[in-house]
């Protein structure tokens, strides 16, 4: 795993200053502590920071052979098969790693080589003969890539936004639309940017810039298709699903450095550890963190799996008041990021890095196989929606939802307001709101009239509605999963894992996001994904021979960070201070008196606004780093 950066002049081959490349890669030095390299040629330059995983002593980057240069971040898991195929075509290899496969693959296949790659990647290829720069990102967005057009006509790119920002010609101007997106979703999605003009290459896209032809729009080279269905018994489909899971795990166990796994004791990470143990001749190294609060602590379940598979297990307890990492997280995410589980993830990655250099995770199974509670709820709500005409449903359920009291404090069966309101809406609109943090009504209270005018009608939920409407899908669960894979997964889950693992010099791999597994899961009948109030139904059935039932069928927990309690305790003064923030006032975006009322209501227990207050705190800190 690495960091990359580069400059390309698409009009004329102006000289590239190596000092600018060094500054861009120095800003990302944490991504590659094992060495740096810079290469320039007329009109182009690449820089690379390396975390050595495969062919540790060889494969320096940027890698140049004749007229082709490559700068690569990631891993190609099928590089040995591709290497053999390319050698059969006459390619001569000088290293033992996967980077050189991209170099020769470009020569033989051009952009079509992307279809042959199994892995996580973001890379640049410069073809001097064609006068072209080629940027590409993996199918699901595991690895990031940011880019911008500069005032002097150059195109700058880097793994992280801070790499692009290190170029002195980048203009730092905030984009109010990204603020709307962030408040709605808790992260800035891949089609938005807090710094106007800096863009993220979308997952499954490439950008081919040919000198003298301008800068085109990125082109999509992969998509997941939910419109087709596998047929067969649950037993047969489960066997095939397990085989693809096993392929995803074993292909990601190739490394020339110590390797282990994150283990929470949930289905996903436990399944990964089970398949690792099956394939490994030695004990798997597993890492777990726990919490002081018993209701949030999964160490007991993790120990059960560790003992079951005789892993080499380590664990650590995270304090409930572990909010001292706020500024560290702000520095590594660049844009505001309000998924509070990032705090626990940072501690987990720290622990893992003390013992291994590569760690396999269970990320992606919930998105690929419908594992979130919201998927189960959405399926049930869609069945109810189908029983009533839209106009009648809107009048009945919408009215009931508006008059039903909001009771965040009550047991879940009594918290019906959200469900009633959702049943009164279109399914896509309701699902878009279910994945959000700060709802449209609260955002409307927070934004000033000037901010609303500047937004020009832009609304964060619309991208979810559009993704679900246009999805290659058959039913409601398909559409929800498609939108999650396109928006939530790269914007939240994979951003979190990439930035935090790279912050501590750890490579995280996601075997349950192997594209062959994701494509197969998308073809499973919806009833094989959600059944009897259970998400990931077929995956759990397939893992029954491996995992205890109390692991497979226990309620989902995840990393639960007590931010609501923090803003009624140790961070209460921070919440109150936001009303008087000079920076927030200077933006002109927010009704600060309303923000003060929100903080006071939360502190007094009259309302639940912990997540919104966390968003505002992280936003203020991020704006300070980005624009002051």
Image (tube, rainbow, N blue to C red):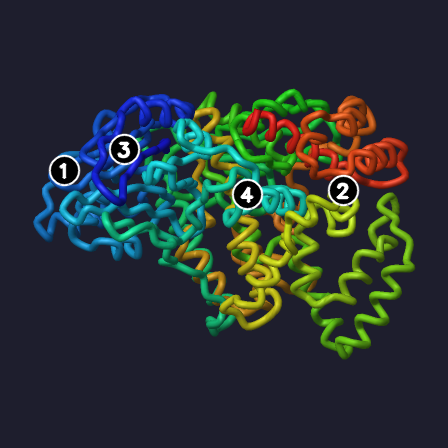
- Residue 589, percent from left and from top: 69, 39
Q: CA distance from mark 4 to mark 2?
A: 27 Å
Do callouts 3 and 1 mark residues in contact (Cβ within 8 Å)?
no
**Relative to 272, residue 160 above or below:** above
**Residue 557 at least partly seen:** yes
- Indicate which disc, 4 or 1, sits on the residue closer to the N terminus: 1
Label 4 or label 3, whichever lies nearer to me, is 3
Q: Left or right: 598 with respect to 301?
A: right
Q: Secondary structure at mark 4?
A: helix
Q: Which label belongs to residue 21?
A: none
Mark drawn on residue 446: 2
Name the N-terminal-most of marks 3 and 1.
Answer: 3
Out of 449 and 203, give the one closest to the viewer: 449
Front of the two marks 4 and 1: 1
Residue carrying label 1: 65
Q: Return the disc, 4 or 2, that comes first in the chain's sequence.
A: 2
Q: Earlier in the sequence, mark 2 or mark 3?
A: 3
For the residues bearing labels 4 and 3, Cβ distance under 8 angstroms: no
From the viewer's side, name the closer residue of 220 and 293: 220
Q: Position of residue 13 (x, y in %)?
A: 21, 38
Of tags 2 and 3, the one toward the viewer is 2
**Residue 291 in the image, given as x and y percentages of width and height:** 68, 28
The residue carrying mark 3 is 46
User: Dot 1: what SS?
Assistant: strand
Q: Residue at x 90, y 58 (%)?
A: 404
Q: CA distance from mark 4 to mark 1?
A: 36 Å
Instruction: Tell me if label 2 and label 3 are in contact, CB under 8 Å.
Output: no
Gap in Å between the C-alphas at discs 4 and 3?
28 Å
Identify residue for label 4: 493
Left/right placement of residue 244 relative to residue 426 reads left
């Amino acid at each position: 795993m690495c960091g990359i950066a580069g400059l390309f002049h698409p009009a004329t081959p102006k000289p590239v200053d190596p000092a600018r490349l060094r500054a861009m890669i120095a800003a990302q030095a944490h991504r590659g502590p094992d060495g740096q390299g810079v290469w320039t040629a007329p009109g182009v330059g690449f820089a690379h920071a390396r975390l050595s995983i495969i062919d540790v002593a060889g494969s320096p980057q940027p890698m140049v052979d004749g007229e082709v240069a490559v700068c690569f971040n990631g891993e190609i898991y099928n590089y040995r098969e591709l290497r053999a195929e390319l050698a059969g075509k006459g390619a001569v290899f000088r290293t033992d790693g996967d980077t050189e496969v991209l170099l020769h693959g470009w020569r033989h296949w051009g952009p079509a080589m992307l279809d042959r790659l199994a892995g996580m990647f973001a890379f640049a290829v410069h073809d001097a003969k064609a006068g072209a720069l080629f940027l590409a990102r993996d199918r699901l967005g595991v690895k990031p890539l940011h880019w911008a057009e500069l005032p002097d006509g150059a195109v700058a790119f880097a793994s992280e936004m801070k790499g692009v920002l290190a170029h002195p010609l980048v203009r730092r101007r905030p984009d109010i639309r990204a603020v709307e997106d962030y408040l709605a979703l808790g992260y800035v999605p891949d089609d938005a940017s807090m710094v106007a003009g800096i863009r993220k290459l979308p997952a499954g896209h490439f950008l081919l810039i040919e000198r003298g032809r301008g800068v085109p729009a990125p082109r999509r080279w992969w998509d997941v298709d939910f419109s087709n269905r596998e047929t067969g018994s649950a037993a047969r489909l489960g066997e095939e699903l397990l085989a693809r899971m096993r392929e995803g795990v074993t292909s990601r166990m190739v490394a020339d450095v110590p390797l282990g796994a994150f283990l929470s004791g949930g289905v996903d990470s436990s399944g990964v550890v089970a398949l690792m143990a099956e394939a490994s001749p030695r004990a798997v190294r597993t890492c777990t963190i726990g919490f002081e609060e018993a209701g949030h602590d999964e160490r007991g379940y993790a120990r059960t799996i560790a003992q079951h598979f005789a892993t080499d297990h380590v664990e650590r307890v995270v304090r409930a008041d572990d909010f001292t990492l706020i500024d560290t997280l702000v520095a590594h995410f660049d844009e505001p990021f309000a998924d509070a589980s990032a705090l626990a993830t940072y501690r987990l990655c720290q622990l893992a890095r003390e013992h291994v250099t590569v760690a396999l995770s269970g990320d992606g199974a919930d998105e690929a196989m419908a594992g979130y509670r919201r998927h189960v709820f959405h399926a049930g709500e869609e069945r109810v929606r189908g029983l009533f005409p839209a106009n009648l449903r809107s009048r009945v359920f919408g009215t009931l939802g508006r008059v039903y009291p909001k009771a965040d404090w009550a047991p879940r069966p009594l918290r019906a307001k959200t469900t009633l309101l959702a049943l009164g809406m279109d399914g896509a609109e309701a699902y878009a709101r279910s994945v959000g943090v700060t709802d449209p009504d609260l955002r409307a209270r927070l934004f000033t009239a000037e901010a609303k005018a500047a937004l020009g009608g832009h609304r964060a939920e619309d991208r979810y509605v559009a993704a679900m409407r246009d999805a290659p899908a058959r039913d409601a669960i398909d559409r929800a999963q498609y939108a999650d894979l396109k928006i939530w997964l790269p914007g939240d889950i994979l951003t979190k894992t990439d930035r935090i693992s790279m912050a501590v010099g750890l490579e995280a791999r996601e075997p349950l996001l192997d594209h062959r597994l994701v494509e197969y899961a998308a073809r499973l009948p919806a009833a094989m994904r959600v059944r009897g109030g259970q998400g990931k139904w077929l995956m759990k059935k397939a893992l029954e021979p491996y995992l205890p039932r109390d692991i497979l069928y226990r309620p989902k927990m995840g990393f639960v960070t007590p931010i609501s309690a923090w803003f009624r305790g140790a961070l209460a003064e921070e919440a109150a201070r936001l009303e008087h923030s000079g920076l927030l006032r200077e933006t002109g975006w927010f009704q600060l008196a309303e923000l003060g009322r929100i903080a006071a209501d939360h502190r007094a227990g009259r309302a639940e606004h912990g997540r919104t207050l966390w968003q505002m705190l992280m936003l203020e800190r991020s704006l300070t780093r980005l624009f002051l």
